[in-house]
Amino acid sequence: MPETRFQCGMEAVLAILGGKWKPLIVYHLACGPHRTGQLRKLVTNVSEKMLIQHLRELTDDGVVRRIDFQTVPPHVEYDLTEFGQSLTKTLAPMCEWGTRHMPEVAAIVQNRKRASVPA
Amino acid sequence: MPETRFQCGMEAVLAILGGKWKPLIVYHLACGPHRTGQLRKLVTNVSEKMLIQHLRELTDDGVVRRIDFQTVPPHVEYDLTEFGQSLTKTLAPMCEWGTRHMPEVAAIVQNRKRASVPA
DNA sequence: ACCAGTACCGACTATTTTGTAAGTATCAAA
DNA sequence: TTTGATACTTACAAAATAGTCGGTACTGGT
């Protein structure tokens, strides 16, 4: 019963998109529907388990829609719900910032690595 | 040496703001400089260790500036650098989305809790 | 002398999150 | 009948993240 209270909108967003691969998944789904195998290739380095786990959570949260073609072998596609699309729209400026400052951020992260691996 | 490569701007943002309390810290610092003790009260439920740890990382990343008044007992203030301010600007629309959809998101999260505590 | 308040550090533990490797089911093709 | 492809599951292990508690240094008030 710890009531869900958000201090600012950011927290609400993170409640939905908190997860190592979720932003990437949503990012790729913004371009249209994809099936599981495609996403596994697009979201580099994601394990099958994490991909499906996050897809499930996003589906449960109403961000993503799962379309099962009911065939054998299975064919399943995912795409964004309207809720998910409204989210990606507001995410766009942040993505732009990230894109614009990408070299800067990469350098920052690189610095951190040196600090933590002093060998 | 896994080179730092970002698939999309979002990843770059998360590289900087990934951390349970960082968005909140930045959010409060957007209103002006604060000293450590004030932040500890504003960022509810944060432990002193995590607050300081995150403040340090944000400082190292050039998002936050640490101002030490060199007094005894110590007096330290934190505020956003220009880099940090450019970041909060692009974060704003996302915060707005979160604010607008807060009840919806709260309901979603509430649902998850029920699912994971079936007792 | 002792305690309180400041900002911060460090060892240790707990919790959460992510990853690995294997297995399920079904059918088609070889 | 064995293999391959699909989407997905499960048990277990590792890693990342967060939290607790005690300690540092300094000084002012009691």
Image (tube, coloured by chain):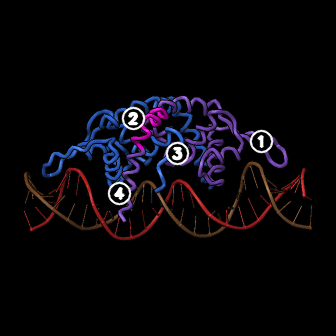
Chain colours: A blue, B purple, C brown, D red
The crowd level at tag 3 (other Cα within 10 Å; few <14, some 14-19, many 20+) is some
Which type of secondary structure does the marked residue at label 2 adopt? Answer: helix
Residue A84 is situated, as x and y percent measured from the top left of the image, at 34, 37
Question: Which residue, given by chain and number where applicable, does mark 4 sit on?
Answer: B115
Q: Is residue B102 left or right of residue A113?
A: left
- Main SS of the magenta part reads helix
**Spatial CA span between label 3 and label 4:** 26 Å
The amino acid sitting under disc 3 is Gly
Place of residue A78 in the rendered image (x, y in percent of width and height, measured from the top left): 26, 42
The residue where tag 2 is placed is A87
Say if labels 3 and 2 share a chain: no
Spatial CA span between label 1 and label 3: 25 Å
Q: Which mark is residue B18?
A: 3
Q: Residues within 10 Å of mark 2 (few under 14, many from 20)?
A: many
Which contiguous range is marked in magenta? B94-105
> Helix, strand or loop at disc 1?
strand
Q: Please identify, in this view, whether the residue under mark 4 or under mark 1 is nearer the observer.
A: 4
Upstream in sequence: badge 1 or badge 3: 3
Q: Which residue is mark 1?
A: B68
Cα distance between the residues tagged 3 and 2: 19 Å
- Foreground tag (3 vs 2): 2
Q: Nearer the viewer, residue D13 or A92?
A: A92
> Residue flagged by tag 2: what amino acid is it?
Leu
- The residue nearer to you, when weighing B111 against D5, is B111
Tell me what residue is drawn at x 47 percent, y 49 percent. A4
Question: Given this view, does label 3 or label 4 mark the residue nearer the observer?
Answer: 4
